[in-house]
Amino acid sequence: RTNPQLMARGLTERNIEHEIAAMRVFHHSEGLISAHAFLKHTDPLTSKTMTAVITPLYNGGSLERVLKNKTLHLSFQEKFKIAKDIIAGLTSLHTKGYAHRDLGARNHFVTIDKRSKKKRTITCVIADLEKVLPIQRLKGHAVQGNTEYLCPEGLFPEFMEGSMYLQSDLFAIGCLFWKMYFGKKPP
């Protein structure tokens, strides 16, 4: 009542217990999405169990949406700020020994704060923590959720283990940065 905030509510009928656990581990970590609440209820019409995740509202939507928006025109400094935010989020994961494994442009959320017509502040967080796992538990798992960001060694997940997954996350954000700066997929 004293500090109202506009929030987003993601609703699903899928089991997202693993993602909820990851969001709790990384609650308020720099560069990562943070949830304010997790709610479960049974839909009275379908009798399905629904889970709602309450997060801050990212008014720009996904980074993929922002990059496709032809009227937004991100400056070099704004793209650089987005890149720094993504690196901060990846650092939050990697320093605790976790790999993300799904770092496509659709899994980053952007907030655009327009203070005036000439000045705006852009922030970006890494979202979709569904595939986040500690590297000790990673051996032979899929490397990235989107093949557009797949490192060459990720073609053979049976040989992947441990810190190789951290390196594959770095390859994925390198591809994302290329796409962000040049407006197309890397060669």
Image: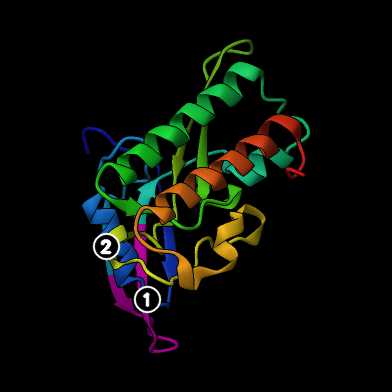
In magenta, the rendered stretch is 40-53
Q: Is residue 137 above or below residue 96?
A: below
Q: Is residue 169 above or below residue 77?
A: below
Describe the colour scheme in one phrase. Answer: rainbow
Q: Secondary structure at mark 1?
A: strand
**Residue visible at 46% across and 36% down?**
86
Residue 117: x and y, percent? 63, 13
Q: Is residue 135 visible?
A: yes
Q: Does the magenta run of residues contain 65?
A: no
Mark 1 vs mark 2, foreground winner is 2
Q: Residues within 10 Å of mark 1 (few under 14, many from 20)?
A: some
Residue 34: x and y, percent? 32, 46
Left or right of 135 in this view: 148: right
User: Distance between the Cα atoms at labels 1 and 2?
Assistant: 31 Å
Q: Does the magenta run of residues contain 45?
A: yes
Residue 33: x and y, percent? 37, 45
Tell me which amino acid carries mark 1: Met
C-beta proximity under 8 Å, tags 1 and 2: no
Left or right of 137 in this view: 65: right
Q: Residues within 10 Å of mark 2 (few under 14, many from 20)?
A: few
Residue 159: x and y, percent? 47, 68
Which residue is denoted by mark 1 in the rendering?
50
Which residue is denoted by mark 2 in the rendering?
136
Q: Is residue 93 above or below residue 130?
A: above
Which of the marked residues, 1 or 2, is nearer the chain's N terminus? 1
